Image (cartoon, rainbow, N blue to C red):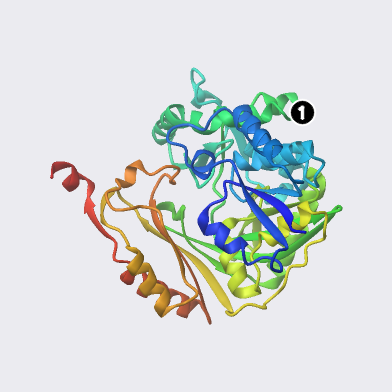
Amino acid sequence: MSSNIFVMGFDPFNRELMETLGEPGEYAWHALLEYPGIIEPDDAFPPFDELLATARDELEAFPDPVDGIIGYWDFPTSGLVPLLRQERGLPSPTAEAVARCEHKYWARCIQAQVVPDLVPRFQSLDPFAGDPLARLELEFPIWVKPVKAHSSFLGFRVHNRRELTAALRMMRERIHRMAEPFNGFMAHVDAPREIAAVDGYHCIAEEIISRGHQCTLEGYVFDGEVTVYGAVDSIRSGRYRSSFARYQYPSTLPRRVQARMIVATRQLMDHIGYDNGAFNIEFYWDPRSDRIRVLEINSRISKSHSPLFLMVDGAINQQVPVELVLGRRPRFPSREGRFAMAAKIMLRLHEDATVERSPTQADIDAARARYPEVRVRVLAPAGTRLAHLDFQDSYSFEIAEIFLGGRDRKELLAKAAEIERLLGFRFARADKAESA
């Protein structure tokens, strides 16, 4: 019989990928909660407990056994999945272990206990305090972000008090979009008093660590044993090098550096008490000082890496959470794919504009005819004002994702340039579009 696996926010792009898993008939896939509402709501996310209740109702209405529940999106998916699994007795990290990863201030406090040399100086800030700058203990420049966000949403590099004041003003206007549902999740978690006081309406300020090379380790914990099965490079671009340009797999970092990252990963996941779940953890390595730093821990796989693992290793990384939730040690292949290297290219504009022309299906088909492995997701359809896109970083707008494979970095970049030409985006400057 097929195992019934519920996928939160199941979307067509990832459904196509997940149908590559297992033998024919091994898995029956089911959507849990609608994609737009759980990932890209029109305004704010519904209350967390409302989402939780809706998901429970959908699972209760299913007439057959629920064998697994997985998710590959960031919050609120990452908070809902462990609670739903625990209620049904499915293998899962606890909600507390997930919160220790997802709450950026709590995560930093734990990291400072376990791997203090890998953690920048940091502190919490309340953007709604009467004089939030009076509490600032760090020297500029600093990075400021909410205690819960994703995709660098409301993340700012600030160099002085004037810029910090502007960043905190933006926080006050928009932080509620994540703060409300995150506080709803934290109500289900037994957090220490000093952590509970730093709720979703707070932000974290920390020293700048974004020097050198960024690398993400993908791994899992099964019955207390931490395994890392892949390392992916993150290449940034734009102002302050704060915007992702591409993910590239496998990592080109020296093996000795990756080994040090793996040691730190095992120490952290053990201390957090994270078990029977997938994760990814982001690091920086500065080749000049040979120093590594922890950026953050995510209590999920990175869906952005899935086509890369498929092209290089022969399986998508969703295989890992699926096998874990079924109580099995994952059997992930290595270097059994068609390509030696793969990348996700994030096409971006670094100034506001209106999309005059976006790729048609014929454009995408032409790209796939030339390079059959290519997958394209258009994020900014024709007529879109880029400033109106949701959950963008503070310095750029992502208009499309391109996944492709090749022999090496040179071939990947050459393919990417050709595909961008075939897609045929055109833009009008925002001020020109407004006056037309």
Identify residue type, mark 1.
Asp
Residue 265 vertical placement versus 174 (above, below)? below
Farthest residue toward the right? 223
x, y (%) of residue 220? Answer: 75, 56
User: Which quadrant holds the N terminus?
Assistant: bottom right
Farthest residue toward the top? 130
Residue at the spot x=50%, y=22% of the render? 128
From the viewer's perspective, tell me whether residue 184 is left or right of residue 128: right
Farthest residue toward the left? 436
Residue at the spot x=62%, y=63% of the render? 19
| Picture mark count | 1
Farthest residue toward the bottom? 407
- The foreground one among 395 and 436 is 436
From the viewer's perspective, tell me whether residue 153 is left or right of residue 184: left
Residue 371 vertical placement versus 84 (above, below)? below
x, y (%) of residue 56? Answer: 68, 34
> Can the viewer see residue 264?
no
Residue at the spot x=62%, y=68% of the render? 309
Crowding at mark 1 (Cα within 10 Å: few <14, some 14-19, many 20+): few
- The foreground one among 110 and 121 is 110
Query: For residue 27, what is the image quadrant?
Result: bottom right
Residue 60 vertical placement versus 183 (above, below)? below
> Can the viewer see residue 122?
yes
Disc 1 is placed on an element classified as: loop
x, y (%) of residue 2? Answer: 74, 58
Give the residue at mark 1. Answer: 190
Residue at the spot x=50%, y=28% of the render? 176
Query: For residue 109, what is the image quadrant?
Result: top right
x, y (%) of residue 161? Answer: 43, 32
User: Which quadrant holds the C terminus?
Assistant: top left
- The foreground one among 15 and 367 is 15
